[in-house]
Image (cartoon, grey):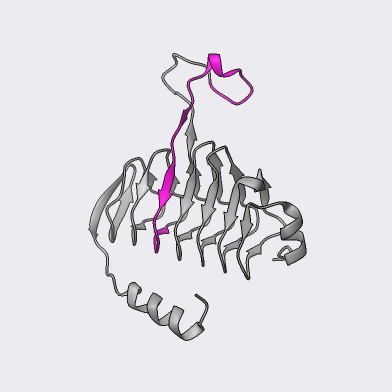
Amino acid sequence: MAFLTEEQLKEAGFKSIGKNVSVSDKASIYNPAYISLGDYTRIDDFCILSAGEGGMDLGRNVHIACYTSLIGKGKISIGDFAGISSRCAIYSSNDDYSGQFMTGPTLPSEFTNVTHKDVTIGKHTIIGASSIVLPGVNIAEGVSIGAFSLITKDCEAFSFYFGIPAKWIKSRSKDLLKLEDEYLSTTKIN
């Protein structure tokens, strides 16, 4: 996997770029002026980041794995140390599927009823492969989402969720918070 150079990242016109950011040269980035990338963030091959008016903020040490898409007009925020596995889709905009309106981006807005809502993914959250997050969802700190899950509602901190739609399974350990402190203190990269 080839990553864009620091110069290429600056030329792309991102809102802000942290240090040691890795963005694949095979990723597709739309509206970079609305996208902030934190320190040590990595975006892999064939990802799509399409920021709308709300923008997109990725914290430090965030990993967006291959074939993942982050799309929509609402703001998408991903907290520090979060990981989004391969083939996930995070939407901050969604068409109306009722049949009362037409759908698709090729139509004027008076014929559609698109919902735009912010999505927040908390610090230390991990989202399993092929999962989907819908507009308006707040995934709290430390949440673990099992593969192939559909997230339609908010998720409580330090919990496991799984299913279609995703349901609470059990609590998750907070030991990773100690490891975060150790990592930040030993690497001196605050």
> Which quadrant does the N terminus fall into?
bottom right
Front position in the image: 92 or 10: 10
For this view, does 37 lie left or right of residue 120?
Answer: right
Most prominent secondary structure in the magenta stretch?
loop
Q: Is residue 125 above or below residue 139?
A: below
Residue lying at 38% horizontally and 44% vertically, measured from the top left: 150
- Is residue 108 a member of the stretch shown in magenta? yes
For this view, does 79 lie left or right of residue 159?
Answer: right
Residue 60, position as x, y percentages in the image? 51, 65
Number of residue marks? 0
Q: In which quadrant of the rendered view does residue 24 lie? A: bottom right
Residue 141, position as x, y percentages in the image? 34, 59
Residue 173 visible in the snapshot: yes
Residue 137, position as x, y percentages in the image? 37, 43
Q: Over which residues does the magenta segment extend?
A: 103-127
Residue 71, position as x, y percentages in the image? 55, 41
